[in-house]
Image (cartoon, rainbow, N blue to C red):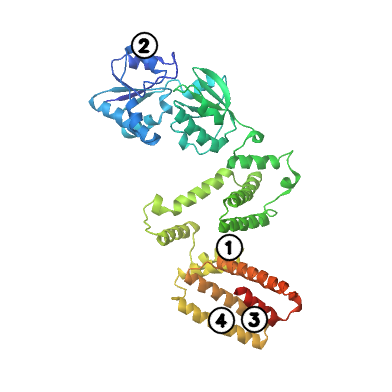
Amino acid sequence: MGKITVVGLGLSKGDITLSALNVIKSGVKLIARTSLAVSYNQVTDLVGEVPSLDFVYKKSRNFDTLNKNLAKAVIGEAKTGDVAYLVDGSAVEDNSVLEIIKKHDNVEIIAGVSAGAKCLENVKAVESGYTVISAYDVGYLKVATYPLIVYAIDTRQTASNVKLILSDLVGEETTVTISSTNGVKEIKLYELDRQEYYGYDFSLYIKKQPLTKKSRFDFLDLIEVLENLRGENGCPWDKAQTPKSVEKNLIEETYELIDAIEEGDDDKIIEETGDVLLQAAFEIIFGVERGAFTLSDVLTGICYKLISRHTHVFGEDTATDANSALDVWNKNKAVEKGYETGADYLKAVPRNFPSVMRAEKVGSRAGKYNLDFSTVEETFIKLDEEVNELKTAVKLGDKEEIKKECGDLLFTAVNVLRKLGVDGETSLNATTDKFIKRFEKTESLILNDGKNIKNLTANEVDCYYRKSKE
């Protein structure tokens, strides 16, 4: 297997470095990524026409397979001897080169002038820490970081694809600067696929946007907004908040998100998810301000937890269904938390959970230590037992005993639901909603008869209630 030398040709005439020139003139077998790039003309001026991989573009289904197919073709050429792979721009910005490095041991890289540097040169911008990505790889971009450069926008279709992806990240009304051999100009992002010229020298540049000019935001923007609100010239209310003061807000926003989910209202889900994220962002800011932790600590913690507990995905464990996956999760969690006893596991359920949810989780965890009802029928027997014990306490008139037996009855009822696979919180909420609707209907029937519900006896109201159920 021969050596592969990857040579970056730059973007325009005069970009070829001395090292690249020596390789091209060395007599080694040359193969170009594409003959359509402006920089390819430099090669033909030096050594004449060079075989290209333009045909690979036509047979590749998407950008990911394109890079793999390009790498496969180059490695195939190297089977019979050394080869120089000529790419437009810089070799270190090309994902097909990355694929070659993964699969071939003998690779040398001559970087060349990068598309990012050439774009900055054209738009007369001096930047550091910029993000540069090929139009063929822009789909991998999850968050827009600035300044942002997208290069090799070679066709209208490619421009349309870039526009759609970036519109979601930065907003289609964002002003961008386009650069090519035809010149430089500013346009709105939505105009990207309406230009007269496209080519491998066509790049897009987006400078850093102030918060007040952005139309799309990410989580880091949320953190920055809060930092401004709590800053010296910020909002008096936001500056006055503490972890304790927003505690109630976090609980309320969580329940509002649950309501939106149950209603299946996507607009509400978007709004309420944002409100929950806001409360989480507040807690991060509080931690940063007192020097306790950083945003990176929070994100590292949750990612580490997800990876370390999903050893059936990221490790050696196996899981064939949801239940076995949950068993793996709980096993890893027990090790991570250092639970020494079953009691430690039960006491770890937060006391401030809603009562039904806490009872359900405690019962479920006890079951993992073989303290549980064997069948649903056993829970019914225990429920009857608790009802009778409550009746006895009521006859005796012992308030403390009544309170204790009421708790036992509720705890057993929750376990009945748990053994039936029914979520207690949602089940009770659904029944409460149903009762409210029936009350509303009952009151309506009474009003239709010209009566006032408060003036009727309990039996009379019950008759109307039964009618409402019909």
* On screen, residue 231 above or below 207: below
Choose the circle earlier in sequence order: 1 or 3.
Answer: 1
The N terminus lies in quadrant = top left
The residues bearing labels 4 and 3 have C-alpha atoms spaced at a distance of: 11 Å
User: Residue under circle 3?
Assistant: 402
Choose the circle earlier in sequence order: 2 or 1.
Answer: 2
User: Residue under circle 1?
Assistant: 350
| Closer mark to the observer between disc 2 and disc 3 | 2
User: Residue under circle 4?
Assistant: 386
Judged left or right of residue 350, residue 73 is left
Residues at circles 4 and 3 in contact by the CB criterion of under 8 Å: no
Type of the residue with mark 1:
Pro
User: Residue under circle 2?
Assistant: 45
**Closest to the observer, 470 or 4:** 470
Q: How many other residues sit within 10 Å of disc 3, few (<14), some (14-19) or many (≥20)? A: some
Type of the residue with mark 4:
Glu
Which residue sits furthest front? 449
Choose the circle earlier in sequence order: 4 or 3.
Answer: 4
Circle 1: element type: loop
Type of the residue with mark 2:
Asp
Circle 4: element type: helix
Q: Position of residue 259 (x, y in %)?
A: 60, 58
Judged left or right of residue 311, residue 116 is right
The residues bearing labels 2 and 1 have C-alpha atoms spaced at a distance of: 74 Å
Residue 277 visible in rendering? yes
Residues at circles 2 and 3 in contact by the CB criterion of under 8 Å: no
Q: How many other residues sit within 10 Å of disc 4, few (<14), some (14-19) or many (≥20)? A: many
The residues bearing labels 2 and 3 have C-alpha atoms spaced at a distance of: 98 Å
The residues bearing labels 2 and 4 have C-alpha atoms spaced at a distance of: 94 Å
Residues at circles 1 and 3 in contact by the CB criterion of under 8 Å: no
